[in-house]
Amino acid sequence: MQKNYVIGFPRIGEKRELKKVLEKYWAKQSDFGDVEYVASQLKKRHWNYQKEAKIEFISSNDFSYYDNMLDTSILLGAIPKRFENLKDEELYFAMARGNENSVAMEMTKWFNTNYHYIVPEISKETTFKLNSKKVIEEYKEALELGIKTKINLIGAITYLGLSKSVDNNDVFLHINKVVEVYKELLLEISKLDEEVVVQFDEPLFVKDLDSKVLSLIKPVYDALASVSTNIKVVVTTYFEHSNDATKILVNTPIWALGLDFIHGVKNFEALELIKNSNKILIAGVIDGRNIWKSNFQDKIQLLNKISKVVDKENVIVGTSCSLLHVPFTLSYEEKLDKEIKSWLAFANEKLKELSLVSKQFFDFKLNLDEVSSIRKNAEENSQRKISSKIHNIKIQEEIKSLKLFERVDKFQDRIKVQREFFKYDFLTTTTIGSFPQTPQIRENRKNFKANLISEEVYESEIKKYIDDCVAFQEEIGLDVLVHGEPERNDMVEYFGEMLDGFAFTQNAWVQSYGSRCVKPPLIYGDVNRANPMTVEWIKYAQSKTSKVMKGMLTGPVTILNWSFVRDDLPRSAVTRQIAYAICKEVDDLQNAGIKMIQVDEAAFKEGYPLRVENIKEYENWAVDNFKLSVSSAKVDTQIHTHMCYSEFNDIIKTIEAMDADVISIETARSGNRLLRIFKEVAYKQEIGPGIYDIHSPRVPSVEEMVEQIKSLLEVLPKEQLWINPDCGLKTRKWPEVKQSLENMVKAVNIIKKGEIK
Ligand code: GLN
Ligand code: ZN
């Protein structure tokens, strides 16, 4: 007995094997047998890694070809009607990705992670029935390899809570049917072995639930935990505390509760209840969301604090959530700075941490290797604290002595000066920044990084792109131009690479959805902008036109939300450093004559906390840091921001408080419906509601865009409106972009002529 527990393990493969085989299969270069073969190899390898690391509770059914929520829809027979005629893998991937006849199911973010799940579609017609053998087969598959697993399932309440009702009914009307299917499944599971542990993931319990949902917890888990005496039911929650649910769960016959003590510190408040109920506590203390090496001493302290209340024999040491949200292994990081690497632990390394921490905590006998690993952990952690790589005293001092946190002039005064200065009237046309990333541009970047071409060649290619891009924008008559971002691989990586305090990996991929993975930068130290980051390129672009050239930066909150962030400073403090760097860039740009600057906050909304009680605090520092990042802007410098979403109803006051002169938003797909909130709150600043959807290659007609603009004018006065696409154009192809933007400008001209009459 090791008394340690892994909630779930990544499945994409340490070399993204699953991604590769899936994409081949989708491209019809492989058959499904190849996919199944790779999958079985991966499962075997992942189980063995956990076994070698001496993990006691290893999961089955945490593997998925695409997504666990999708698997659950299949398991429960919740298949939307439009896929009725399909079966097996054809059905599965059509639900995930659509096919010639049917659109895919929707996909959305899994709580506050960057993982996306397939949203179940439920209606009166949904017939729930046990519809898949995957759960049983995966258990047997592991058993044949000599590994007895616990079985992972998505909890009934979370499953329904995250689904959407196609007929606008309460999704929880179906709870009994879901429970019935789970009961049937549990009966089958009970026949698998003398005793089986079943984990129900219920992360929905960390949200602020209404009493109706809370009232379901007891009947559901009374039922599920009494199906068979040889099944031990675990309910796990993660990413926040779940105290309201814990109060109820302790009075059900479940065996154990898994709680997150890293991201849900308030779970400590529930310890007394757990003690009194005699439930097993799976204490999530190894961080499944971040990539820093655990400090074993801190972990033991945390566990001691827990076991002061809950009897030690009732504690199992666990990960805070599934390790799905961290990269696979450090083994392939050959280029990463050695010192920084010694501070990191990815999924595979976290297994060893978990095993060592539990051994220490329970006073199990350690071998010599383990003793030396523990010593090394202490050394590396204390070395990290004092490393000169992390601390930049000069920046710390500068930030401490900051006096100006927001722009001096008020919007009403600024906008007068700016309208005078830029001489625009109304319905001013612009774009969001990027233009198509062509194969040549990618090739150029790749060759430069691989040292195959000189800096001169690299730069001249980029200049050529900018020349063409500017010429095109002038030709079609756009009002405010951009340089097109050909020098940027990614809106966060580009800035990270220029800032001190950021590191980049070769292989630290994390699954984002299906076969898609992202490789977030690591912020390990104080952030410092040693040199200007964008000024030369924007200046060059401006030199090619007499029209206004808009500078393009990524905002501090977005850079933070799309990175792995150091854990030795509060997120707000890290954001402050990034904001300060952007603030200097804004100043350099305006001094170089760039007087219109866009600071993108694509991920502002993503960072919102899961619990209402924490929202005010986030909004305060996120807004403050955005304001700091543009505080250097003078009265005649116009600050734009861009956000990649459109639901502003709940956060409109916060958006207003950001105090940007102009905001562009993603409303093309919702007509003018979502714009109304801006009118309702008497929003003063200017707005560019995207008038066409850039997420599809379709070219919208002039007439269509005329209609779209007219509908915007029904809500807001022309003076307040800018006209632009929905988002950046980098994923599109030139022919579509040319046609679409030409049509956009034509549409505006038609409207303007009408105005003059
Ligand atoms: N300026 C960026 C671009 O145009 C913004 C992208 C985004 O918000 N996602 O690509
Ligand atoms: Zn966008």
Image (spheres, rainbow, N blue to C red):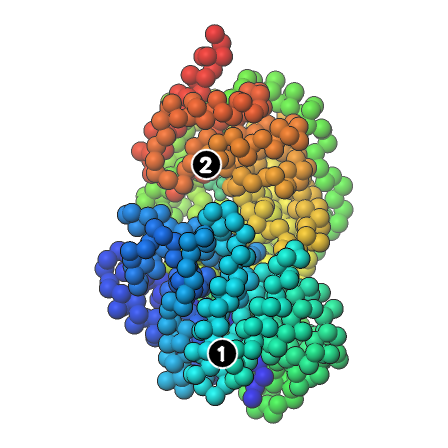
Left or right of 245 on screen, residue 322:
left
Residue 39 screen position, x and y as percent: 34, 70
Q: Tell me the amino acid under the disc marked 2.
A: Arg
Residue 271 screen position, x and y as percent: 72, 73
Who's the residue at 36% across and 43% down the image?
A: 441
Judge: label 2 CB < 8 Å from ligand 2: no
Residue 692 screen position, x and y as percent: 43, 32
Left or right of 742 on screen, residue 548:
right
Residue 675 vs residue 480, the one in the foreground: 675
Identify the secondary structure beneath mark 1.
strand
Identify the secondary structure beneath mark 2.
helix
Who's the residue at 37% across and 69% down the image?
A: 132
Residue 310 vs residue 197, the one in the foreground: 197
Q: Residue furthest top?
A: 757
Above or below residue 491? Residue 325 is below
Q: Is residue 448 visible?
A: no
Q: Is residue 170 visible?
A: yes
Quarter of the picture holding the N terminus: bottom right
Whichever of labels 2 and 1 marks the residue nearer the N terminus, that label is 1
| Label 2 CA crowd tier, 10 Å (few <14, some 14–19, many 20+) | some
Q: Label 2, label 1: how many angstroms apart (C-alpha)? A: 44 Å
Residue 22 screen position, x and y as percent: 32, 61
To which residue does mark 2 refer? 669
Left or right of 666 on screen, residue 317:
right
| Label 1 CA crowd tier, 10 Å (few <14, some 14–19, many 20+) | many
Quarter of the image where one finds residue 425: top right
Quarter of the image where one finds residue 460: top left
Q: Tell me the amino acid under the disc marked 1.
A: Lys
To which residue does mark 1 refer? 150
Who's the residue at 48% across and 88% down the image?
A: 194
